[in-house]
Image: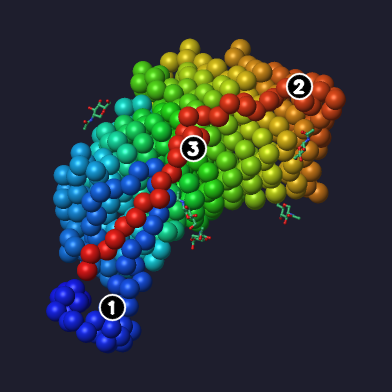
Amino acid sequence: MDSLPIKFQVKKNGVWMLLLLAALMAASTESRKAKVVDSFEYIAMNCRAHSASITEFGAVGDGKTSNTKAFKDAVDHLGQFSSDGGSQLYVPAGKWLTGSFSVVSHFTLFLHQDAVLLASQVDINEWPVLKALPSYGRGRDAAGGRFASLIFGTNLTDVIITGENGTVDGQGAFWWQQFHKGKLKYTRPYLIELMFSDGIQISNLTLLNSPSWNVHPVYSSNILVKGITILAPVTSPNTDGINPDSCTNTRIEDCYIVSGDDCVAVKSGWDEYGIAFGMPTKQLVIRRLTCISPYSATIALGSEMSGGIQDVRAEDITAVHTESGVRIKTAVGRGGFVKDIYVRRMTMHTMKWAFWMTGNYGSHADKNYDPNALPVIQNINYRDMAADNVSMAARLEGIAGDPFTQICISNVTIGMAAKAKKVPWTCSDVGGITAGVSPRPCDLLPEQGPGKMEEGCNFPTETLPIDSVELKTCSYKINY
Ligand SMILES: *[C@@H]1O[C@H](CO)[C@@H](O)[C@H](O)[C@H]1NC(C)=O
Ligand SMILES: *[C@@H]1O[C@H](CO)[C@@H](O)[C@H](O)[C@H]1NC(C)=O
Ligand SMILES: *[C@@H]1O[C@H](CO)[C@@H](O)[C@H](O)[C@H]1NC(C)=O
Ligand SMILES: *[C@@H]1O[C@H](CO)[C@@H](O)[C@H](O)[C@H]1NC(C)=O
Ligand SMILES: *[C@@H]1O[C@H](CO)[C@@H](O)[C@H](O)[C@H]1NC(C)=O
């Protein structure tokens, strides 16, 4: 291929030469690849001035060769353009085995539709160990540090991870076994984690078999997660889909998630560590999410919510064969708050509970939590929902002496399963109202009558700043 431009320059009888070249290209498989991916366009928050392909750094897409060094070299090289128009790294079709690698500012990682990033298991040294997150105080799987995620970044501005539905495969089975055997010295890696970063886009990818959580933006802001398919066995441990954690201004939309844990879990730190760190998750919108998670929630708020969770909007959500719809999980000792939560137009098929709130989740970071640190759960609004084949409409358990208040549920019809529990609602230490809800709610949430449906639980009318982010059409040209 290197000689191609030279031939064009040398030959004067161009038409004849072009025809010959076309015939040659059709005959050669290598040329055929080059023709297919000559250049392409994609949609992103920002475009880049500089480009490279991972193959330029010696990467081999055979699924066997470790490419950790190639990714590090590529990012090191492209990092020099962070303040010079930014850069994009292209990963062509192939199976690219790699350990953890970091990204840089003003950088785009773009996966071809047949590109698979395969998480390496060959050498544990390909997974650096990081300190525990400050708002958690310890790792989730073990008291010490945690393995860096497959794709990691910290203290960055403007990072895009996208593709044409290319795949990131965490090969999690190895890690799930280690977890079940209690053999982990450190907490399992996530698939994608960005910390202390501003301006993040994660879009148009398929994420398979993460060792643990899939997408974890933490201490970050201005985040778009769009068009992500997340697949993991429904029995796999802690394979949460998308976990915005102490993040501001986040938009999650058009995602399809089948997993072994919550499809979206909104978090903000754990007990005394989360209280001290004091960074809430706020301004979050989740829309057009489809979730299948038989043992967990469609959208969970908590259980780590000690920095607070405020202003969450979720709309046009579909849950199928999922344990619960919206679940609030907290405990004495968490402190923090979950307030101003709005959910509308959720459709649920085959659920254990449509609504679940738990004030006694337990699960403490250590014994030093403050028993006087009570969470504030307030202004929780659910409206315009239909569910069928549900075992229990709602199980709402606040904390004695610390009730969950201003709960509002309006225009919700829950079809009960043939083998449903006899009492469809159980409520304790909660307060609020309902209107046009069936089956008839518990007495702590008195029914105002269907005529009052328009009067409460209203979804905010003003949009969030992240909704006005405009995506640009960017292009990539391949140099052959
Ligand atoms: C994702 O892919 C769809 C379908 O190919 C495309 O229309 C859309 O622009 C892409 N979006 C992003 C944010 O990459
Ligand atoms: C990243 O930013 C945080 C918060 O501003 C800061 O505490 C930390 O030291 C920074 N880390 C690095 C590696 O620069
Ligand atoms: C992306 O790939 C997954 C897995 O093959 C598939 O289920 C999904 O439909 C694809 N999404 C798009 C938008 O093509
Ligand atoms: C209802 O849910 C049960 C499990 O609780 C399931 O076995 C059954 O197939 C579901 N029925 C329908 C019609 O979806
Ligand atoms: C009630 O909710 C359903 C969706 O379940 C929706 O189609 C309908 O428009 C809502 N009615 C009112 C009065 O808002």
Residue 381 in the image: state x and y as whole percent: 66, 26
Q: Is mark 1 within 8 Å of ligand 1?
A: no
Closest to the camera, between mark 2 and mark 1, is 1
Question: Residue at label 3?
Answer: 251
Q: Earlier in the sequence, mark 2 or mark 3?
A: 3
- In the image, is 168 to the left or to the right of 230? left
The foreground one among 57 and 194 is 57
The foreground one among 127 and 316 is 316
Q: Secondary structure at mark 2?
A: helix
- In the image, is 212 to the left or to the right of 257? left
Q: Residue at x 19, y 58 (%)?
A: 70
Looking at the rendering, the quadrant in which ligand 2 lies is: top left
Question: Residue at label 2?
Answer: 455
Q: Secondary structure at mark 3?
A: strand
Residue 323 in the image: state x and y as whole percent: 62, 44
- Check the picture and name the quadrant holding the C terminus: bottom left
Q: Is residue 177 above or below residue 454?
A: below
Residue 464 in the image: state x and y as whole percent: 51, 29
- Residue type of the residue flagged with mark 2: Glu
Q: Are marks 2 and 3 in contact (CB under 8 Å)?
A: no
Q: Residues within 10 Å of mark 1 (few under 14, many from 20)?
A: some
Q: Residue at x 51, y 16 (%)?
A: 374
The foreground one among 148 and 472 is 472
Q: Is residue 165 above or below residue 354?
A: below
Q: Residue at x 31, y 27 (%)?
A: 134
Residue 395 in the image: state x and y as whole percent: 68, 32
Label disc, if present, on residue 31 of the rendered structure: 1
Q: Secondary structure at mark 1?
A: helix
Q: Earlier in the sequence, mark 2 or mark 1?
A: 1
- In the image, is 359 to the left or to the right of 3? right
Q: Is mark 2 within 8 Å of ligand 5?
A: no
